[in-house]
Image (tube, rainbow, N blue to C red):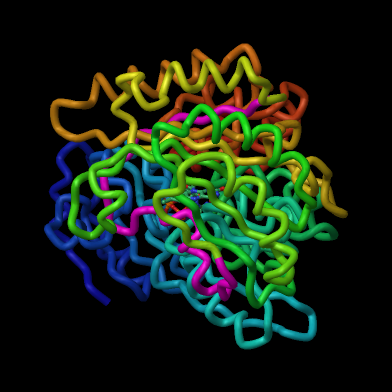
Amino acid sequence: MTTTTTATTTDLTDLTDLTDLASRVRGPVLAGDDPRAAEELAAFNLAHDLRPAVVVGATTAEDVAAAVTWAVHHRLGVAVQATGHGAVSGIDGAVLVSTRRMDTVVVDPVRRAARVGGGARWATVNDAAAAYGLAGVSGSSSGVGVVGYSLGGGLGLLSREYGFGADQVLSLELVTADGEVRRVDADTDPELFWAVRGGKGNFGIATEVEIALVPAAEVYGGGVFFAAESATEVLHSFRAWAPTLPERSSTSLALLRLPPVEALPEPLRGRSVVHLRFAHRGSEAEGAELLAPMLEAGEVVLPGVGMLPMTAADAIHQDPTEPMPVHERGLLLRELGADTVTALLEAAGPGSGSPLPLVELRLMGGALGRQPAVPNAVAGREGAWSVLALGVLAPGAQDAVRAATGRVVDALETWSTGTILVNWLGDATDPSEVARAWRPEVHRRLMAVKRRVDPSNVFRYGHALGV
Ligand SMILES: Cc1cc2nc3c(=O)[nH]c(=O)nc-3n(C[C@H](O)[C@H](O)[C@H](O)COP(=O)(O)OP(=O)(O)OC[C@H]3O[C@@H](n4cnc5c(N)ncnc54)[C@H](O)[C@@H]3O)c2cc1C
């Protein structure tokens, strides 16, 4: 246990009993201005200055419960961080619980399920599940945390067949605002179980989730890079082809502007390209036949599709793995017509002047559009396509990047469902902006649960509902 009692966080009046908290917690307890707090706060998204009053490196549910109880006693809010892939600012003065030490994963191959610690990443789940030919419904990057991803919805590589990440959650261990460690499932508190699967971190800190695994040792998948000059043909082919795919296939397409770095293969270095991503849970022959029409759609500068173990599925999207300052905005589309594609290309295509390194379209539909056996509060089931516009907030580029993501959203607004995937809310943290993720009746129901379970709005950070 590491403690510091020099809690000179001057804007708080009484932190002298940080020692008391430290005596109840097995992990480190640090004042926010302690130099050692920086390591605890290290996040994937570097865009935000994180200035909590206190950082608790939790090792158990009891540590989390002690931190929440202490925070409530001191009238402080509680924030949570596992990997910082979804880090957002505005946590000044909070008690930040870091769950990254709670990364145990236990697979039950008979029940096709895994018990996953509150701070575990997808890589740990898929590595453990692979031994049994199983995998989680994970997303584009295995560095993302299982709990944050799943409670925010979770749009995964196998989601058209199996649904959102949240749909796989069978039960949770949740520390709520009253400091209780609760087991939450369809029997114990059905309404809270509905809300927390989609309502993200608004109801407590999940110290463990039990998730369903799916039989997927490998997929036929990868990415194909097309020349920027082919962008118009590739996008129009994609919008016609993608909806014809079976639910066992998922696909997305990204307009990329890649930096001139050695780490990239020569045909991609410093170039604008169109990146088609594809994953099919089935044989190589079946997958190749499904993909074939798209390979004719434009000039391929780098192919890269084949049988992939799910433990290597990061090769499909090739997301960055090094921390960076990211700004993103998302929306959902009802349809992707020829005019939608034209609008997208004008806003972000090659020659548009857009500085954004990534603007992607993901095909939704299939199981994503259906409630799971035990319905939940996931936002965005009505979307046919998801759009994500992402920029890097390099010094001096911030205004241009924000303007460019805004141009993409504005250009596509006509076709928007009006809802947003919670995991795509980016740095929208004001409750009125967050509310837009859900249809109004779903948001009203979420608010009723929030007011019952967390009436003082202890969990008021991140994509917060407010009270
Ligand atoms: C490179 C990259 C790829 C991504 N790919 C996908 C994708 O394919 N599909 C998709 O749906 N999303 C994707 N995302 C978005 C990602 O799912 C969200 O940002 C998610 O919130 C990250 O969770 P985390 O725990 O890793 O991040 P953190 O920043 O540690 O946590 C973010 C938030 O998650 C919640 N949270 C985390 N842990 C807990 C907990 N134990 N209890 C309660 N709430 C908790 C809290 O609200 C917290 O503020 C991606 C993000 C990045 C940066």
Q: Nearer the viewer, residue 315 or 461?
A: 315
Left or right: 465 with respect to 27? Answer: right
Left or right of residue 465: residue 216: right
| Residue 104 is a magenta residue | no
Q: At which x and y percent is residue 144?
A: 46, 58
Left or right of residue 227, residue 173 in this image: right
Q: Is residue 72 visible?
A: no
Query: Is 81 or 308 nearer to us in this picture?
Result: 308
Give residue 280's position: percent from left, percent from top. Answer: 68, 61
248 vs 327: above or below: below
Q: Is residue 183 above or below residue 412?
A: below
Q: Where is residue 57 in the image (x, y as percent from the top left)?
A: 34, 65
Image quarter in which the N terminus is found = bottom left
Residue at image location 19% in from the left, 35% down from the top: 394
Number of marks in the image? 0
Expressed as whole percent of the image width and height from the top left, the position of residue 398 reads 23, 26
* Front-lying residue, 43 or 451: 43
Work out whether 77 lies above or below 404: below
Whether the magenta-drawn stretch holds residue 318 is answered as yes
> Which image quarter holds the C terminus?
top right
The residue sitting at 70% across, 39% down in the picture is 241
Residue at 24% across / 45% down in the picture? Answer: 14
Q: Which image quadrant for residue 350?
A: top left
Residue 411 at least partly seen? yes
Give the left or right position of residue 62, taking residue 302 as reference: right
Residue reaching furthest to the right: 373
For the record, the magenta segment spans 306-333
In which quarter of the view is residue 184 placed? bottom right
